[in-house]
């Protein structure tokens, strides 16, 4: 489960942190939920966010995976609600559209755009944390207060304006 934190001051977005919870080491699903709740509370108590944005559940073919994801999201939401922090959910397509201009963008495209927008030196190997950061940035853009400076009409425009930042594969 990935998460990202931004700070907004004077209508400007500033990157704080991105990371992910390492849950694979826990076999018990209920222990994983407890870890998610405790870590979310710890992040809230450390950073004192005004708002939380999360990616809404998406419909997949594996019902068990959807159920586990929904429980994990519910636990994270409960942690925020226990501290009386408003929560906003965004559909994955809306998050991708807000970041790249393309609702069908890949995780890699979203991560590269975030790297450019927030001037991140590097990206993590696993992109779950950039998914969390993307939800935060999407919320910033949808809050009616951004001062975004440089913008792109989509992935193609980003590639054309940033030829040195994109590796061809």
Image: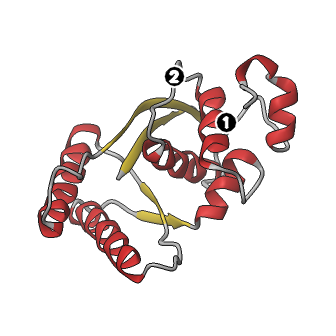
| Camera-nearest residue between 169 and 26 | 169
Q: Nearer the viewer, residue 76 or 167?
A: 167
- Label 1: which secondary element: helix
Residue linked to disc 1: 113
Report the colour scheme.
secondary structure
Measure the alpha-carbon separation of dots 1 and 2: 12 Å
Neighbor class of circle 2 (other Cα within 10 Å; few <14, some 14-19, many 20+) is few
Residue for badge 2 = 122
Residue 102 in the image: state x and y as whole percent: 77, 54
For the residues labelled 1 and 2, say whether their Cβ atoms are less than 8 Å apart: no
Q: Quadrant of the C terminus?
A: top right
Foreground residue, 65 or 83? 65
Give above or below for 121 relative to 9: above
Determine whether, in the image, residue 91 is placed left or right of residue 55: right
Provide residue 39's location: percent of width, then percent of height: 20, 49
How many residues crowd mark 1 within 10 Å: few (<14), some (14–19), many (20+)? many
Horizontal side of 65 relative to 159 (left or right) equals left
Quarter of the rendering containing residue 71: bottom left
**x and y percent of residue 123 in the render?**
50, 29
- How far across and how far down the image is residue 118, in percent? 58, 28
Identified at 45% across, 49% down, the residue is 132
The answer to whether 113 appears left or right of 14 in the picture is right
Q: Residue furthest bottom?
A: 63
Residue ID at (29%, 62%): 76
Residue at position x 45%, y 34% from top? 125
The residue shown at (28%, 60%) is 80
């Amino acid at each position: 489960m990935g998460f990202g934190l931004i700070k907004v001051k004077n209508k400007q977005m500033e990157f704080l942190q991105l990371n992910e919870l390492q849950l694979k080491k826990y076999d018990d699903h209920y222990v994983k939920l407890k870890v998610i709740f405790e870590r979310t509370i710890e992040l809230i108590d450390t950073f004192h966010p005004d708002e939380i944005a999360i990616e809404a559940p998406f419909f997949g073919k594996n019902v068990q995976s959807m159920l586990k994801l929904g429980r994990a999201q519910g636990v994270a939401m409960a942690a925020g609600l226990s501290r009386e922090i408003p929560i906003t959910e965004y559909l994955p397509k809306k998050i991708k559209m807000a970041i790249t201009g393309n609702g069908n963008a890949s995780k890699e495209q979203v991560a590269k755009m975030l790297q450019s927008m927030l001037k991140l030196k590097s990206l993590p190997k696993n992109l779950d944390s950039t998914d969390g950061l993307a939800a935060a940035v999407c919320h910033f853009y949808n809050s009616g207060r951004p001062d975004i400076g440089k913008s792109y009409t989509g992935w193609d425009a980003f590639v054309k304006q940033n030829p040195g930042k994109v590796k061809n594969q």
